[in-house]
Image (cartoon, rainbow, N blue to C red):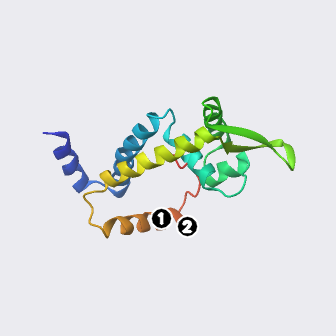
């Protein structure tokens, strides 16, 4: 039995956890492929995107809290991004012990290109949905994520 047929049969009997996990796995693989082509991970792209979209400097601690990424994981990712020349960590003007990560010009260009590629991949992944289904799916997932159901911690990736 071909994988897609077997997977389709499983999907019809699966619980919500399996369905969400499998969809995230498939989309995550596509997103990672787009990111890897530019030398970053999906988590790295998440960090670059947060830095690109903020209008104010953000400390490493605040960035980790906003992305729901623990300090150790974030520090390792920032180290990789800094070695690649995509970010710099500047001292916080209010507390020299604190670092504020910021995009370099190259980091901004890589982030924008990977975001474009990931957006194209997402559009391809969701192409079988009707035009009104994607906003509905996004809205439902956002409500589930924002709900008071536990756990309310954990990494975005």
The residue where tag 2 is placed is 148
Asked which quadrant contains residue 130, the reply is: bottom left
11 or 24: nearer the eye?
A: 24
In the rendered view of the protein, which quadrant contains the N terminus?
top left
Q: Quadrant of residue 72?
A: top right
Q: Mark number for residue 71?
A: none
Q: Is 17 on the left-hand or right-hand side of 4? A: right
The first of marks 2 and 1 along the sequence is 1
- On the image, the x and y values in percent for residue 22 come to 34, 48
Q: Name the residue under label 1.
A: 142
Local crowd size for mark 2, using a 10 Å CA cut-off: few (<14), some (14–19), many (≥20): few
- What percent of the width, then of the height, locates residue 104? 65, 40
Residue drawn at (19%, 44%) of the image: 4
Does residue 6 lie above or below 151 as drawn? above
- Residue in front for this viewpoint, 103 or 30: 103
The answer to which quarter of the image holds residue 66 is bottom right
- Residue 12: % across, % down: 22, 56
Q: Residue at x 43, y 34 (%)?
A: 37
């Amino acid at each position: 039995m071909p994988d897609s047929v077997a997977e389709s049969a499983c999907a019809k009997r699966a619980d919500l956890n399996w369905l969400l996990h499998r969809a995230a796995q498939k989309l995550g693989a596509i997103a990672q492929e787009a990111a890897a082509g530019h030398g970053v991970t999906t988590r790295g792209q998440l960090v670059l995107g947060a830095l690109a979209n903020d209008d104010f400097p953000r400390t490493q601690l605040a960035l980790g809290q906003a992305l729901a990424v623990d300090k150790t994981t974030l520090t390792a990712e920032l180290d990789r991004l800094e070695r690649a020349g995509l970010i710099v960590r500047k001292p916080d003007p209010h507390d020299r012990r604190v670092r504020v990560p910021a995009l370099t010009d190259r980091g901004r260009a890589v982030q924008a290109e990977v975001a474009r590629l990931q957006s194209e991949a997402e559009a391809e992944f969701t192409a079988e949905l009707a035009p009104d289904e994607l906003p509905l799916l996004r809205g439902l997932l956002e409500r589930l994520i924002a709900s008071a159901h536990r756990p309310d911690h954990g990494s975005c990736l």
